[in-house]
Amino acid sequence: MTRRLSSVQPAAPIRAAAGLALGLTSVFALFAGTASAQTTTGTTTTSSTGLTVGINPSSLITHTLPNGSDFTRDSTLNPTGINFEDCERDVVLNFPLVASGTASAASGYALYAFAGTNCDQGSTYVSPGVAGSTCWPVVNGPISYNLNASFVIGIRARQILSQATFTVKEPFTTVATTDDSVCHIQPTSAALQISVYFVFGTTMGLASIGGSGVTQINADLAAAAPPTSLTIGIGSTVLLPTWNSITDQDIVGYNVYYQPLGAPAAATTMQVCPGSDGSTSDESGTTTTTTAQSFTLNALGDDGGDDGGDGGDDGSTDAAATPTSAAQGCYNTTPINATPIADAGVPYHPNGVDCPSPYPAGATGSGDAGDLSGVSTADAASDTVDTTSDDGSVGTISTAASVADISMQPREAKLPDGSYKYPFVTATGNTANSATLSNLTNNVEYVVGVAATDSYGNVGALSTFNGSDMICQWPQQVTDFFDSYRSAGGLAGGSFCQVESPDLPTGAGGSALVAGAALVFALRRRRR
Amino acid sequence: LIRHLVATATSLSAVLAASAMLGVLTWAPDARAVDDRGDILTGRHRRAFESPQRWALEFRGLLYAPNIDSDSALGNNTPYKDTFGTMKRLAVQLEVDYQAVRIPHLGTLGPGIGVGFTEMSNNTYILGHPDEPAKEQTSLDIYPMYLVAVLRADVLKRELKIPLVPYVKGGLGLALWRASNDAGTSTFTQTNGTTVKGEGHTFGTELAAGLMFNIDVFDPVGAGNLDQSTGINNTYIFAEYYDANLTGIGQSHPLLVGSSGWAFGLTVEF
């Protein structure tokens, strides 16, 4: 029997109302001059026509997945920028714009979107495809807009990045959803800075500018270097990994991934239902209404098949995809929360031992193994296109490109109990060099890897250990002082207040202190 | 960290002792006679201003090594030494005395209460492999406390103008203790399957004798001003030998966390 635990897909009227409310809120905020905690900045240029267009200063550039689900990062992780995951998922950057002017002034002009340099210079503008061109269209043709009102333009990340490295910028070409080569154009750690222009022009040639606005998009597609010298210290029900931190100021922390090796769990099966696809237009450049989408996880009483559509094979326990409710796009999944196989005879290895990675073949060097449902990437053997569903979990993309694989932040891969499908702990700060993995099971083998995360949310390659990216280690029963004391014949212990002799009442120690304090105060009062 | 603190405390103790010695050697009664008015005949020794004196506050540092391994139940085993070694740890304490009675031509007498803390820690080792340390830490926290009677014989200072005050303390002691590891409070599973938590308390006696040196002699004017502005009558540094004989009075299975040794610190009377 299927029991739906939650549903967060709003009905169409509700979505419409929400969209209207969102729009009204934006307009109100625009005219009221209120600004949110983090605003998007841009520059607006007014020409003799009086037309203006630019970023709405009271709104944010947001990210949505191709299916409309919100994918905006935490405010601390450059949410308006593009990271590797954004590129691989080909997220839509939603630019909040506002255009003003008279209808007569706007007559004869259309609104276009370009990326590049000096795309608003009119007479010096060189058309794409011509030597000297510095701008490329990111939307094919004119953009629909609302004059004297706020509106949103959605532009795919890959379109923005598509010609960043071209010497001569070319006319508009749609980047195929199956082509992620543009996501590998930045082998260094320095972020790309790309200006996006919104220009009122008479034609795509932009010989005559009727007003323009520009904003800068930063893109960091490079993985952080792997931490080095990972060792896994042993404790009782804990493992204590340490590593050498990376001297890169862009690093904001480290994710320490761990999971037990062993047989898959038998019972924990979930049904995964993707959020309904929003009515966004991410390629045509038409006006969009963004509605937050999400997915639901439904507990199942029996073991189903698998999550539908593995964007990146998690390489572990998932079986074949079995749609259970095609209308809803729901699938059953068995997550990786393997039941450990106890091994009482585990040997002692101070720093752990090399062990096979549980992550997908070809994806070594990545920090998070898991599904990449919804990602339109089909350029590697381990990736299959999944345009049907998004189970919310994310994972490694293994590409045919030679660029080192970069894993992804598993921020949506949560189980019904709130835990992550692929558990990790976070060590904050670029100088962090240790973590504690607790509540583990003694004598069970755990595979552990650590990856750095940068200020854009990129998760770098895993640390290496003897050529592998994972270390296996076993929490083991250790002997602490109290063990030694009791084993040697000592009999003390129990609790702070326990009194083993009938001569003294429980809490005698505390009572003595209270009595002492009372004596002091009594004497003081008497003195007065 | 503990080693560092102990080293620092040792250095500080040396400095304090040296300072005390220097003070005694260089102390000149004539220099303080300018501001102090001594009256041998009446037994009074006053500054131009002297606020009432009822309390003493001690900031104490102790070198602490619990006598756990002396427990006869352990036989010849030495679990404390095996785990934490023989190095003494630094304990910090705060003591408050109420000087209830002034005994003419002797000093003050009254109750005092002290509370302190010390911790020792080291790596655990793999069960069955005592030569293979694990990374997990094991710690023993001790909170030594006592309720004592304190006699401070300040007659030398007050009547003979010698800035030394010997003192003795005696009373009851109590220590709370907790053994822990990275997972929290330690536990031990007994053969009957029950577990015992690694925490408890131990009663005993507390004895101490020490000597305070009045550092006001270095700046009598400043000391007078301090008294006038804050009510602090005297400031001392001290060295003391203490014996926290926490053997478990009335207890059948105490953890012998008592210690004896030297304590140093600062005392103010107000």
Image (cartoon, coloured by chain):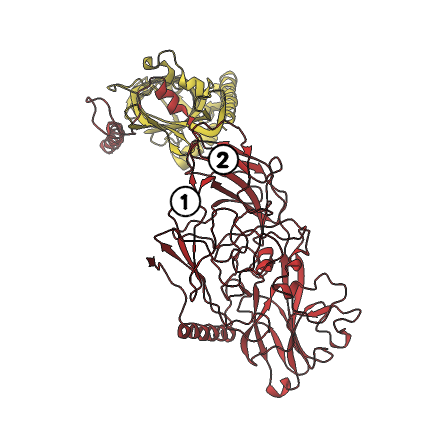
Chain colours: A red, B yellow
Q: Amino acid at mark 1?
A: Ala
Q: In the picture, which quadrant includes the N terminus of chain A?
A: bottom left
Q: Nearer the viewer, residue B215 or A248?
A: A248
Pinpoint residue A384: horizontal percent, then vertical percent.
56, 57
Q: Nearer the viewer, residue B72 or A157?
A: A157
> What chain does badge 2 belong to?
A
Name the chain under label 1.
Answer: A
Number of numbered tags placed on the structure image: 2
Is A494 situated left or right of B79 in this image? left
Q: Amino acid at mark 2?
A: Leu
| Point 43% across, 72% down: residue | A15
Q: Earlier in the sequence, mark 2 or mark 1?
A: 2
Q: Which residue is mark 1?
A: A265
Query: Residue A37: x, y in percent?
Result: 51, 62
Comparing labels 2 and 1, the label whose residue is closer to the camera: 1
Q: Residues within 10 Å of mark 1 (few under 14, many from 20)?
A: some
Give me the disc on residue B50.
Answer: none
Decide which of A245, A228 is in the foreground and name it. A228
| Quadrant hosting residue B47 | top left
Quarter of the C terminus of chain A within the rendering: top left
Q: Secondary structure at mark 2?
A: strand
Using the rendered image of the protein, determine whether residue B94 is visible from the camera's viewpoint: no
Secondary structure found at label 1: loop
Q: Quadrant of residue A359?
A: top right
Q: Position of residue A135 (x, y in %)?
A: 72, 69
Residue found at x 53% / y 38%: A434
Residue furthest out toward the top: B76
Name the image quarter holding residue B155.
top left
| Cα distance between the residues tagged 2 and 1 | 25 Å
Q: Determine whether A433 is above or below B123 in the image.
A: below
Q: Is residue A301 left or right of residue A411?
A: left
Q: Which residue lies under the disc numbered 2?
A: A240
